[in-house]
Amino acid sequence: MSQPLRVLQIVPSISLVYGGPSQMVMGLSAALAQAGVEVTVLTTDSNGDTGQPPLDVPLNKPVEQNGYQVIYFRCSPFRRYKFSLDLLRWLYVHAGEFDLAHIHALFSPVSTAAATVARQRKLPYLLRPLGTLDPADLQKKKRLKQIYATLLERRNLAGAAAIHFTSVQEAKISERFGTLTKDVVIPLGVQLPSPLPEKGLARAQLGIPESRPLVLFMSRIDPKKGLNLLIPALETLLAEGLDFHFVLAGTNPQDPGYENKILKQVQASALGDRTTITGFVSGEFKASLLQDADLFVLPSYYENFGIAVAEAMAAGTPVVISDRVYIWEDVRDAAAGWVAPCEVEALTFVLRSPLMDAAERHRRGLNAQAYAQKHYTWSAIAQQTIQVYQQILATHSNAS
């Protein structure tokens, strides 16, 4: 009997306050473990910005979780940047015990250093950039990222066995800094509670009438998410007399100033009386919101995948997204929702139609759920990932 694959997943944090990247690592790790892979997650105890207490977890020793192991390390000496010298020391000592590392995040010091250690220890690694190679994202702190890439990340990209993109569009537009590393495209998966909560629980908890369409935004409250497009679009539709209730679910522990600005803007506008602000949501209440929503809206300026979009689809909720959410072609081709350019007028126009047509919302919601069940299940994605791991190891073995 052949020995199972032994894989490291390395990520700066798996605290759920960081949203999609954390959910992805936990979902993938559980699915890989279910498929027979021995998975160990290396991460830090980071739990938000420097004002938040660290995760209350055992440190420096394996913790069993859903069939895989997690080893948490103290953020030190640079807690704000989710950095851990202990994690890197552990990796240097134990790298030879694993077949491959899957490293999540670029331009993050602990991930950058982990790739360097993996090369030193001759451990093949796959890099998942989390959208950080998108030209739009590279504009943020542009000069600093150019220096960082030149000194560190270019070498990490060049030394990777492959770069893991989550959509064809992300791979197409991403910057490689002149490297010729192989691309692989593996989408993300979703795991909602099964069975889903009884329909109507979130509405009842928030006091939203069944007759009123519920428009849900559930994501990090960040400038890239397009709230500056969504809020005026909804204000216009409300002024036209359309009846709906807006739920704004999310937070931003890394930029509370922007979050406060958005919340004040909504509360001071005509939307204030038709908006519920929930903050960060998780678990059954999150699943209830996704199921009770009539429309899920995410008009991001760039989104390498959009895990919340896939979750809404899995819950049977049609989506309205921008053409910068890089699964927009899947949504369009499956008739699982509506797609708009990143413009207020265009978004207003696209939102008007489903808000006026409950039957079409229902039809596209069913399409969305069927597509998600076929393409975004963790079991299917685990099999794709294992195939990529095996190809990498075969190539690495032949090159040795």
Image (tube, helix red, strand yellow):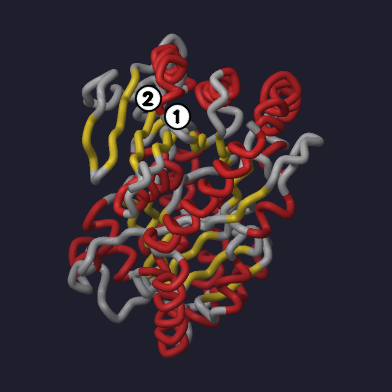
Circle on res. 12: 1
Q: Nearer the viewer, residue 339 or 398?
A: 398
Which residue position is annotated with label 2? 44
**Which element carries disc 1, helix, strand or loop?**
strand
Camera sees residue 151: yes
Q: Nearer the viewer, residue 16 or 281?
A: 16
Compared across the picture, whether 3 is left or right of 155 comes to left
At 55% across and 72% down in the image, what residue appears?
A: 331
Q: Position of residue 123 (x, y in %)?
A: 53, 28
Q: Residue furthest top?
A: 77
Q: Residues within 10 Å of mark 2 (few under 14, many from 20)?
A: many
What amino acid is at disc 2? Thr
Q: Residue furthest front?
A: 1
Q: Position of residue 344 (x, y in %)?
A: 64, 63
Q: Nearer the viewer, residue 331 or 31?
A: 31
How far, Cα to Cα, is label 2 from label 1?
Answer: 6 Å
Quadrant of the rendering where the C terminus is positioned? top right
Q: Nearer the viewer, residue 141 or 265?
A: 141
Compared across the picture, whether 339 is left or right of 13 comes to right
At 24% across and 53% down in the image, what residue appears?
A: 283
CB atoms of marks 2 and 1 within 8 Å: yes
Q: Position of residue 71 (x, y in %)?
A: 31, 27
Compared across the picture, whether 334 is left or right of 74 comes to right
Up/down of 319 relative to 355, above or below: above
Q: Quadrant of residue 145?
A: top right
**Which element carries disc 2, helix, strand or loop?**
strand
At 60% across and 55% down in the image, what residue appears?
A: 185
